[in-house]
Image (tube, rainbow, N blue to C red):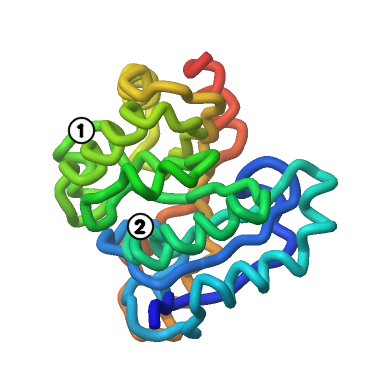
Amino acid sequence: MLKGKIHSIESMGLVDGPGIRVIVFMQGCALRCKYCHNPDTWVTEGGKEYTPEEIVNKIKRFKTYFERSGGGVTFSGGDPLRQPEFLIEALKRCKEEGIHTCLDTSGVGLGEYDEILKYTDLVLFDIKHVTREGYKNVTLMEMDESLKFIEALNRNNTKVWIRHVVVPNLTDGEEHILELKEFIKKINNVEKIELLPYHLLGVNKYTTMGIKYPLEGVKGMDKEKIKEYEELLK
C-alpha cells in the first residue's frame, strides 16, 4: 500500500500560497541549506505514515475554512518532490475534490516532474542561489536538478511564485539581487516574487538534534534592507 511520510500538518497557514491553507510538511530533503530552519525534515525516515486517501480526508475536514478565502492545500517539507508517487496520488485526489493545490519546493526531487505538475495549480519555487558556485555553497549540492525543474515548470506552463531567502553575506547585496532579477527572467508565468529575510527561529532545533549550526553568529536580516532590494526587483 502506497504511503507517505508526513512530518506535520498545519491547518491554518496564511503565508504559503493564496488564502487560508492546510500545509502538509513532508519528510525528506536532499539539500543541506546553511539557513534551513527544518533540519528535522531532512531524512525521509520518521514522521507519521499516511495513505493518499488518508491525507486528503484530513485536508477535506478544513475545506469550509479555506474555500471561502480562495485557499487550499500546500505540500511543503522538507521537499515534497522527494516522495513523488505519494505526492502524485495525493494531488490527484485533491483535484478530484476541487481543492486548490500548491507545492512549496526547491525543485530537487527524483527527476520526473511533469506528472506532478499536471495536478499542481501553483508552485512556490525557492531559488537558493543564481550561480553554480553560490548554489553549492548554500546547499552543499549541485544546481543541475533545480535547473531541470525550471525546465519542467516552463514546459507545463505552471504558475509560479518565487521565493528567495536573503542572508547577510551569503545571498544579499545589490549585485546579487540584480543577478536574481535576471535569473528569474528564465522562468515563465512568475506571478509574484517574495524576498524572505533570514531569521534565527530554527536554531534551537540544531541544538536539540546535536548538529552544529552553520551560520552561528550571523544576525537576522534587516527588514528595511529587504524593502530596498524589493525595489530593485521591480
Rendered view: 187 above or below 162: above
Question: Residue 161 vs residue 154: left or right?
Answer: right
What's the residue at 84%, 57% (across, down)? 64
User: Counting residues from the N terminus, which is met first, the one under dot 1 or under dot 2?
Assistant: 2
In this orientation, does residue 230 appear? Answer: yes
Q: CA distance from mark 1 to mark 2?
A: 22 Å
Q: Where in the figure is residue 219, as x and y percent of width and height? A: 48, 53
Q: Which mark is residue 212?
A: none
Rendered view: 41 above or below 132: below
The kind of residue tagged 1 is Thr
Of residues 76 and 132, the one nearer the viewer is 76
What's the residue at 77%, 59% (across, down)? 63
Of residues 83 and 13, the one nearer the viewer is 83
The image quadrant of residue 147 is top left
Q: Which mark is residue 131?
A: 1
Q: Which mark is residue 81?
A: 2
Of residues 207 and 3, the one nearer the viewer is 3
Question: Residue 77 vs residue 30: left or right?
Answer: right
Q: Where in the figure is residue 150, as x and y percent of width and height? A: 30, 34
What's the residue at 67%, 49% (across, down)? 98
Query: Image quadrant for the N terminus?
Result: bottom left
Circles 1 and 2 in contact, beta carbons < 8 Å: no
Of residues 107 and 177, the one nearer the viewer is 107
